[in-house]
Amino acid sequence: MSRSVRKTKIFGITNAKTEKQDKRRWNRTFRKVCRKLIRLEKEAPVKIHSITNVWDGAKDGKRYFKNAPIKDMRK
């Protein structure tokens, strides 16, 4: 991977590397709520965003960094 570089200058806002744990927590919550509503014979939500808030994650979204140095563009 010595020649591997990013094609776009988009980076996460904070220093967190991944949101894996957050995504796992959100999906578990979503499945739990769906199972509960199905047992109660109510309509289950279709999208995960109706239950969780993506801004509660470690990264808080992404931004375009116009003057990104070459060091940051490496993978």
Image (cartoon, rainbow, N blue to C red):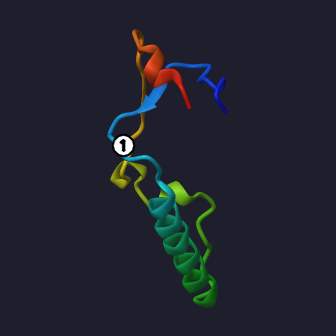
Left or right relative to 46: residue 24: left
Q: How many marks on residues?
A: 1
In the displayed orientation, state which residue is furthest to the front. Answer: 2
**Whole-percent x, y for residue 33 in the image:** 52, 77
Label 1 Cα crowd, 10 Å radius (few <14 / some 14-19 / many 20+): some
From the viewer's side, name the closer residue of 38 and 15: 15
Which quadrant does the C terminus fall into?
Answer: top right
Left or right relative to 48: residue 21: left
- Res. 51 in view: no
Whether 57 is drawn above or below 70: the answer is below
| Disc 1, SS | loop
Residue at 55% x, 67% y is: 27
Whether 72 is drawn above or below 15: the answer is above
Residue linked to disc 1: 60
From the viewer's side, name the closer residue of 74 and 62: 74
From the viewer's side, name the closer residue of 16 and 24: 16
Q: Quadrant of residue 13?
A: top left
**Whole-percent x, y for residue 3 in the image:** 66, 23
- Res. 73 in view: yes
In the displayed orientation, state which residue is furthest to the top. Answer: 67
Q: Amino acid at mark 1?
A: Asp
Residue at 41% x, 14% y is: 69
From the viewer's side, name the closer residue of 4 and 23: 4
Whether 35 is drawn above or below 17: the answer is below
**Whole-percent x, y for residue 63 in the image:** 41, 26
Which quadrant does the N terminus fall into?
Answer: top right
Q: Quadrant of residue 40?
A: bottom right
Residue at 38% x, 45% y is: 59
In the displayed orientation, state which residue is furthest to the bottom. Answer: 39
**Whole-percent x, y for residue 32 in the image:** 54, 80
